[in-house]
Amino acid sequence: MIEKEFRNEVPPGKVIVFMLLIVSLLGGMPLSVSIGLKGFPPLKMAYLRSILGLVIVGGAGLYYGMSLQMRLNELPRLSLIAALHALHIITINIGGLYTTAARSTIFYSLYPLFVVLFGHFFIPNDKLSITKTLGLLTAFGGVCIAIMPDLQGGGITDYLIGNVIVILSAGFLGLRIVLTKVFVQEIYPHRLLVWLLALNTPCFYFLSLIFERDTSIQWTIASSAGLLYQGCIVTGFCFLALTWVLRKYKASNLVVFSFLIPISGVLFSHILVGDELTLSLLMGTGLAATGIYLVNRKR
């Protein structure tokens, strides 16, 4: 055991600031994926991204002298985490083919609600409360308002299959985060993430061989930059940092910051490609910030 007791503390101010940095970096992921897909097929990009993340996380672990060797009793838990991660990636990519980007963002943003729901049953001292639920719903409402201008054309039934698949992906992600919180109490974060990526990499590789056999890679500066951002910044740094923070602090208090990710993504698009900032974005940001305050408010 890493800890003698289950650690599940309320994050202090410095951790909240650190989470704001993480979600700001994660907000650039949708843009990096969009840029990367111009040169890489989806499964090949997931495969290469996993390799980059594996090199960075594994290299950091070896540099600091951490043991990355899997113990036999850890295999079932690591395999479960890796399977949930693979299902999450596959369903979000498939769901995105059958719905719009804005709708995908909204339904994907449901995953913090799944984290709180699963955490109520699996995580000690992290139960649902009226204030926490109100904060989550307020933050989710902020996301909906922020990207409302993009919801043009067609009703929700026109994209029903894609929406359901994206919601399923959010459920897989929510369950993975909760189980990561539980498992990381006994498995070092570096080792957990290394084996998650190591088990997923061949999975993405063989799926790419099956479904993308005739699709070639177009190496360009832009697509390579998108891939490097996903592999180095998102998988290599953000995922590892979140795993370390999740080890000690309450999952429900941390995941509510994820509602800022789509808003941060819009800001990235404004800065890098000149997309217009709208009043709905400002209103949505205010609501999301209010929800985050409610969830992290001390009694």
Image: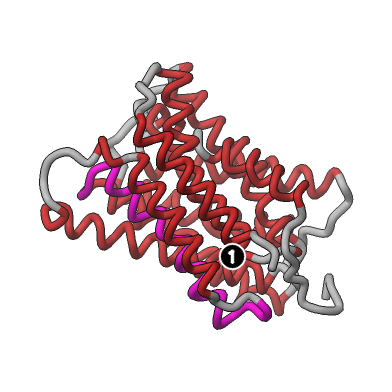
Q: Would you say 159 lies left or right of 86 here?
A: left
Seen as rendered, the residue at the extreme front is: 299
| Residue 252 in the image, given as x and y percentages of width and height | 59, 65
| Residue 136 in the image, given as x and y percentages of width and height | 48, 61
104 lies above or below 226: below
For disc 1, the marked residue is: 252
What residue appears at the point 62 percent right and 65 percent down from the top-left corner?
Answer: 251
277 lies above or below 46: above
| Residue 154 in the image, given as x and y percentages of width and height | 11, 46
What residue appears at the point 70 percent right and 43 percent down from the top-left corner?
Answer: 17
| Amino acid found under the numbered disc labelled 1 | Ser
82 lies above or below 236: below
Classed neighbour count for the residue bearing mark 1: other residues with Cα under 10 Å, few (<14), some (14–19), many (≥20)? many
| Residue 176 in the image, given as x and y percentages of width and height | 53, 66
Q: Quadrant of residue 5?
A: bottom right
Residue 209 appears in the picture as rendered: no
Determine whether the residue tagged by mark 1 lies in a helix, strand or loop: helix
What residue appears at the point 42 percent right and 30 percent down from the top-left corner?
Answer: 36
Residue sitting nearer the eye, 266 or 51: 266
Residue 211 appears in the picture as rendered: yes
| Magenta segment | 98-125
